[in-house]
């Protein structure tokens, strides 16, 4: 009887500890996130952007805990985002030369990708790009969780031409329907 009771108590305490840890991992990024940039400023950046696309929640590499959805805008010197992102630690923003939508796809090209900043808030983002980054050298914005090696989302804002620069989608550089068909 005492052994059974001790086993049940141990199991229940272990379960509570595991749930507490999981809740902490989920809530800590929310509690430590900086304030979102002002909505009006992000909207203005999106409206003035050279390229627009969308993060979609239902990509093959996204899941119930790792996703983003909303508008992504790319201009020389800046990336803006307005939407929702699943909270998580250590989200990095990359520019890639090809569209990927899975963990394996991103890991295959990660070494050729350019990390341009961090996503620390989960509704809006205004990210100043490093001075040496030319958005015309890339096609896609990817959000990646470094801590857990998890794909969050991707948005293709333009297609890469054979020469390496500038072939836009059917509506030109202001592609609002999710990049070049993505």
Image: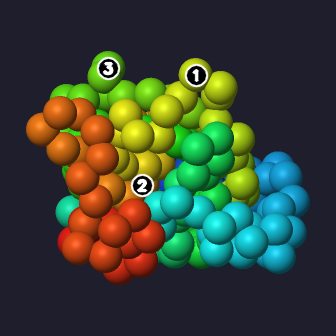
- Contact between marks 3 and 2 (CB within 8 A): the answer is no
The residue indicated by pointer 3 is 111
- Residue at 28 percent across and 59 percent down: it is 168
Percent x, y for residue 9? Answer: 59, 57
Mark 2 surroundings within 10 Å by alpha-carbon count, few (fewer than 14), some (14 through 19), many (20 or more): many
Percent x, y for residue 155? Answer: 38, 60
- Residue at 42 percent across and 54 percent down: it is 152
Q: In this rendered view, identify the residue nearer to me: 90 or 161.
A: 161
Q: How many marks?
A: 3
Q: In this rendered view, identify the residue nearer to me: 135 or 6.
A: 135
The residue indicated by pointer 2 is 152
The residue indicated by pointer 1 is 132
Q: Give whichever of discs 3 and 2 has the lower sequence position.
A: 3
Percent x, y for residue 39? Answer: 80, 75
Q: Give whichever of discs 1 and 2 has the lower sequence position.
A: 1
Marks 3 and 2 sit apart, C-alpha to C-alpha, by 18 Å
Number of the front mark, 3 or 2: 3
Lateral position of residue 40 relative to residue 83, left or right:
right
In the displayed structure, 105 sits above or below 32; it is: above
Marks 1 and 2 sit apart, C-alpha to C-alpha, by 25 Å
Q: Mark yes or no: residue 61 visible.
A: no
Number of the front mark, 1 or 2: 1
Q: Quadrant of the C terminus?
A: bottom left
Please, what secondary structure does the residue beneath circle 1 have?
loop
Percent x, y for residue 46? Answer: 63, 69
Please, which residue is most extreme toward the bottom here? 177
């Amino acid at each position: 009887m005492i052994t059974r009771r001790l086993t049940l108590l141990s199991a229940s305490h272990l379960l509570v500890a595991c749930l507490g840890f999981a809740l902490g991992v989920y809530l800590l990024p929310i509690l430590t996130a900086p304030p979102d940039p002002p909505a009006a400023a992000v909207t203005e950046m999106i409206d003035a952007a050279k390229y627009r696309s969308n993060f979609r929640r239902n990509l093959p590499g996204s899941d119930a805990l790792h996703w983003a959805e909303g508008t992504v805008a790319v201009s020389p010197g800046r990336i803006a985002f307005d939407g929702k992102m699943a909270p998580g630690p250590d989200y990095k923003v990359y520019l890639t030369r090809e569209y990927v939508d899975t963990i394996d796809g991103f890991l295959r090209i990660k070494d050729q990708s350019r990390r341009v900043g961090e996503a620390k808030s989960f509704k809006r983002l205004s990210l100043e790009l490093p001075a040496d980054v030319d958005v015309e050298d890339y096609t896609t914005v990817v959000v990646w969780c470094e801590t857990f090696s998890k794909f969050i989302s991707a948005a293709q804002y333009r297609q890469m031409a054979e020469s390496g620069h500038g072939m836009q989608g059917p509506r030109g550089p202001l592609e609002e329907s999710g990049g070049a068909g993505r």
